[in-house]
């Protein structure tokens, strides 16, 4: 698994509190593989400000490519104050999730400079190979359906933090049940039962659970996903032997001040020239 490489250029102190990416990067530097995976997931979910050559034209973006001593790369910043610090003039940019930027750069052999020249805690260079790796992590195959009969259920034994990640995935009307499972054919692992989902939510949840597993250090084969009705005996059995997974409380809704730019619609990703 690639690690983010720290870049130090004697950057300026902007008087900015640590951002979530700063915190994730610091934890990665002080920790091991779980913390490194947590950084990459935080990067994938973060909204980043990507420097452009010119203002966006519709859904087409032209990122500015910088030829630096470390190689050719794009530049992105995790907050607008850090973006503004690189120039006294207005800098054209697009606000995009890290996962979208990585997907558009995959296979292009371009690195991504994150917060370069700002002195930020997560000031770093993400190598082209690291971005390719991230895209592979985000596009893993979903778990396959298992037909074997359950022989025994027990309390789950999964990495710390995975339960919290699963809670964050659940819609408000849904709930989950998580347990360690042993099947009559000798197979074993974990099973997650989800109930209260709308039919159209199932494919999205399958992809989201697979991604949460990948960033916990597990592969999709480590957990079987089943969809049940809320009053299904199987759901109750798994919840009783294991643990109930409730959705995270909804945060107060804040209306956006203005429409967002290209890349905010997941069904219409921006085209990078």
Image: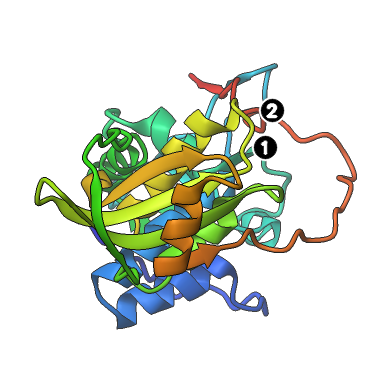
- Single out the residue that lies furthest toward the bottom: 30
Decide if residue 97 is in sight here: yes
For the point 48% across and 39% down, which residue is it?
227
Q: Position of residue 3 (x, y in %)?
A: 26, 61
Tell which circle, 2 or 1, labels the residue nearer the N-terminal end: 2
Q: Which residue is mark 2?
A: 55
Q: In this view of the protein, which residue sits in the foreground, 93 or 87? A: 93
For residue 192, side relative to residue 85 (left or right): left
Q: Is residue 248 above or below residue 130?
A: below
Of residue 204 and residue 59, the one placed in the foreground of this image is 204
Q: Residue at x 83, y 34 (%)?
A: 259
| Quarter containing the N terminus | bottom left
Identity of the residue drawn at 59% across and 27% down? 199
Colour mapping used in the image:
rainbow
Residues at discs 2 and 1 in contact (Cβ within 8 Å): yes
Q: At x 49% / y 35%, what residue is drawn?
A: 100
How crowded is the residue under tag 2: few (<14 C-alpha within 10 Å), some, or many (20+)?
A: some
């Amino acid at each position: 698994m690639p690690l983010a490489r720290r870049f130090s250029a004697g950057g300026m102190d902007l008087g900015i509190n640590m951002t979530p990416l700063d915190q994730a990067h610091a934890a990665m530097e002080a920790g091991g593989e779980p913390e490194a995976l947590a950084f990459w997931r935080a990067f994938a979910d973060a909204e980043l400000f990507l420097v452009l050559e010119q203002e966006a034209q519709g859904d087409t973006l032209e990122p500015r490519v910088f030829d630096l001593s470390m190689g050719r790369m794009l530049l992105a910043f995790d907050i607008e104050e850090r973006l503004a610090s690189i120039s006294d003039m207005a800098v054209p940019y697009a606000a995009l999730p890290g996962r979208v930027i990585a997907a558009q750069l995959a296979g292009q052999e371009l690195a991504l400079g994150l917060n370069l020249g700002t002195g930020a805690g997560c000031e770093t260079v993400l190598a082209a190979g690291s971005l390719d790796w991230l895209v592979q992590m985000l596009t893993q195959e979903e778990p396959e359906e298992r037909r074997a009969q359950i022989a025994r259920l027990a309390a789950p034994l999964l990495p710390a933090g995975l339960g919290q990640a699963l809670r964050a995935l659940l819609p408000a009307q849904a709930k989950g049940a998580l347990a360690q499972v042993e099947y009559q054919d000798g197979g074993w692992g974990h099973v997650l039962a989800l109930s209260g989902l709308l039919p159209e939510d199932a494919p999205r949840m399958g992809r989201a659970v697979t991604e949460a597993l990948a960033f916990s250090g597990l592969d999709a084969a480590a957990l079987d996903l089943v969809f049940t009705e809320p009053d299904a005996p199987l759901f109750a059995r798994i919840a009783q032997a294991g643990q109930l997974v409730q959705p995270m409380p909804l945060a107060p809704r804040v209306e956006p001040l203005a429409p967002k730019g290209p890349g905010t619609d997941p069904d219409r990703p921006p085209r990078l020239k």
